[in-house]
Image (tube, rainbow, N blue to C red):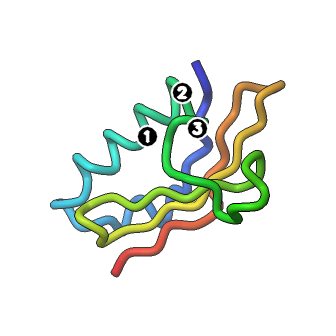
Amino acid sequence: MYEVDPLDEAVGTLPEELSADFLEVRTALERSPWTVGRPWVATNPTGLRTVTFGAGRAVLVFGIIDRECRVFLVSLVIT
């Protein structure tokens, strides 16, 4: 299981209707982060990744450190 370092302030600003979708993404990140989303830069599949959720209303950028079993959240944009 991977540890997910949260963006506390950004996650706290999520509209309530996106909370369930975010929880689903977070659970997937904890279990198998390489299967979540797609590479941020297509030519660098092992770099940062991005996932859209909430019917396209939110975009999360994250990185994965396998040797530490850790996922770090870089950015959360809500539209």
Outermost residue on the front side: it is 43
Q: Nearer the viewer, mark 1 or mark 2?
A: 2
Comparing 37 with 69, the one in front is 37
Residue type marked 1 = Arg
**Residue placed under numbered mark 2 in the picture:** 32
> Which quarter of the rendering shows the C terminus?
bottom left
Give yes or no for contact between labels 3 and 1 (Cβ–Cβ under 8 Å): yes
Q: Position of residue 42 (x, y in %)?
A: 68, 62
Q: Is residue 30 left or right of residue 14?
A: right
Question: Image height check: is 62 above or below 10?
Answer: above
Label ID, residue 26 = 1
Q: Residue furthest top?
A: 1
Nearer-N-terminus badge (3/2) = 3
At 56% from the left edge and 53% from the top edge, which residue is drawn? 38
State whether residue 67 is above or below residue 23.
Answer: above
3 or 2: mark nearer the eye? 2
Task: Check the image and name the residue furthest to the right.
Answer: 67
The disc label shown at residue 4, or none: 3
Q: Is mark 1 on a helix, strand or loop?
A: helix
Disc 2 is placed on an element classified as loop
The alpha-carbon separation of the residues under discs 3 and 2 comes to 11 Å
